[in-house]
Image (cartoon, grey):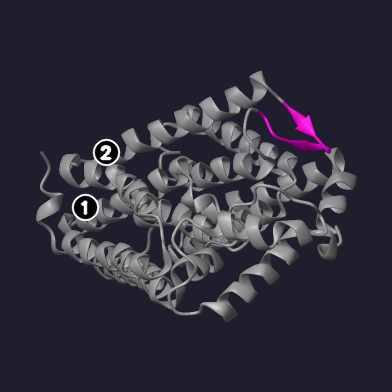
């Protein structure tokens, strides 16, 4: 068993999680929310618990996690390649929708790409091969036609570029800029019309507009305690599905995790969610500042593990994959590794 559970940041995390789930639980007696949904979300804390209990100090942890995430990304690409289903010129693979495929790759890609940056000197051949895997993953994301994933990855990429500049790793900056140029050239040559059609699609023809209108109406009706945890799909089906101009069926979310939390648990539950997010941002920034103060410029794994969390929050602006099992497991795993990285660099006295 590791010693991470003894640190103060772990107990601060426990408090933030209790507030997050506790505020949602507070609303259940007043809005007929579903306790089983809350229990499902709590069950998905398991990866965080395993990191806290099992992670031990040692430089082999980071390469092992990078290898695991890289193999996961490669496995998903293999699954898609084995079953490359297309519909309406968008890549689904074996997933239920192109957005699910895009979010799955998006949550893995930043950490894997970061690992190639960190280990390029130690394992140059392996890093080069993983870069090719990253490029293939990016191509698959583009083929999904998910504008949400385009936006989220673009922001995450430029944040990584910014941190590379702050870390004064100019070789990485040049490499990322070269990668960006190559990607743009590849898009311009391989699929200019496809990308143009996706980016210039009339937003008024997007079903999310109607779902957002529904979410706003529900907020106006029950702003404080919401309609009930896990009941968004039920309320939509009973009251709004018939009037949907795009005739979308079995919709379970307004395609925005923040609106969904507000709708289902009101301002009470939303406040708990925002407290969790602000706690994570504060912890990350404080830990990064401490790293720069103690070690000087660099690219610590703090960044590599927080970038996917940022991607999840950005993707959540226009979709709801945060609440599926796969994404929540990775979300809590990444936060566990942010905690591990924080403690790892606190104990180090030399440059990583």
Can residue 55 be seen here? The reply is yes
Location of residue 312 with respect to 279 vertically, above or below? above
Residue 176 x, y percent position in the rendering: 59, 51
Q: Toward which corner of the image does residue 346 lie, by quadrant?
A: bottom left
Residue at (34, 45) in percent of width and height: 44
Q: Tell me the crowding category of disc 2: few under 14, some 14 to 19, or many 20 or more residues within 10 angstroms, Cα based.
A: some
Label annotation for residue 61 = 2
Residue 331 x, y percent position in the rendering: 40, 50
Location of residue 273 with respect to 322 vertically, above or below? below
State the extent of the magenta-drawn residues as a range.
85-93
Label annotation for residue 344 = 1
Residue 342 x, y percent position in the rendering: 25, 58
Q: Residue furthest right?
A: 193
Residue at (57, 55) in percent of width and height: 234
Query: Disc 1 to disc 2, how far (Cα)?
Result: 10 Å
Residue at (34, 72) in percent of width and height: 282
- Indicate yes or no whether the magenta region holds residue 349: no
Asked whether the beta carbons under mark 1 and mark 2 sit within 8 Å of each other, the answer is yes
Horizontal relation, residue 19 to residue 235: left or right: left
Circle 2: element type: helix
């Amino acid at each position: 068993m590791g010693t991470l559970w003894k640190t103060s940041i772990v107990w601060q995390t426990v408090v933030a999680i209790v507030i997050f789930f506790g505020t949602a639980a507070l609303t259940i007696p007043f809005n007929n929310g579903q306790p089983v949904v809350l229990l499902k979300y709590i069950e998905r804390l398991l990866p965080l618990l395993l990191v806290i209990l099992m992670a031990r100090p040692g430089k082999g942890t980071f390469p092992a996690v990078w290898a695991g995430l890289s193999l996961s990304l490669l496995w998903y690409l293999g699954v898609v390649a084995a079953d490359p289903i297309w519909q309406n010129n968008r890549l689904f693979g074996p997933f239920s929708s192109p957005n699910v495929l895009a979010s799955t790759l998006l949550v893995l890609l930043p950490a894997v790409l970061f690992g190639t940056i960190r280990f390029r000197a130690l394992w140059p051949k392996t890093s080069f091969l993983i870069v090719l895997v990253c490029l293939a993953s990016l191509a698959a994301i583009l083929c999904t036609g998910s504008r949400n994933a385009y936006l989220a990855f673009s922001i995450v990429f430029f944040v990584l570029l910014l941190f590379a500049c702050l870390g004064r790793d100019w070789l990485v900056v040049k490499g990322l800029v070269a990668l960006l140029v190559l990607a743009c050239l590849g898009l311009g040559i391989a699929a200019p019309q496809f990308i143009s059609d996706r980016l210039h699609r009339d937003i008024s023809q997007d079903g999310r507009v109607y779902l957002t209108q529904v979410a706003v109406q529900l907020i106006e009706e029950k702003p404080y305690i919401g309609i009930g945890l896990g009941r968004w799909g039920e309320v939509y089906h009973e009251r709004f599905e018939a009037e949907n101009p795009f005739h979308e069926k079995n919709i379970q979310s307004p395609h925005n995790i923040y609106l969904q939390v507000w709708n289902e648990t009101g301002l009470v539950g939303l406040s708990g969610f925002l407290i969790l997010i602000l706690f994570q941002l504060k912890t990350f920034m404080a830990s990064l500042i401490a790293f720069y103060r103690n070690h000087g410029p660099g690219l610590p794994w703090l960044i590599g593990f927080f970038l996917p969390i940022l991607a999840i929050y950005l993707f959540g602006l226009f979709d709801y994959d945060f609440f599926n099992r796969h994404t929540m497991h990775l979300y809590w795993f990444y936060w566990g590794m942010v905690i591990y990285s924080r403690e790892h660099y606190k104990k180090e006295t030399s440059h990583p």
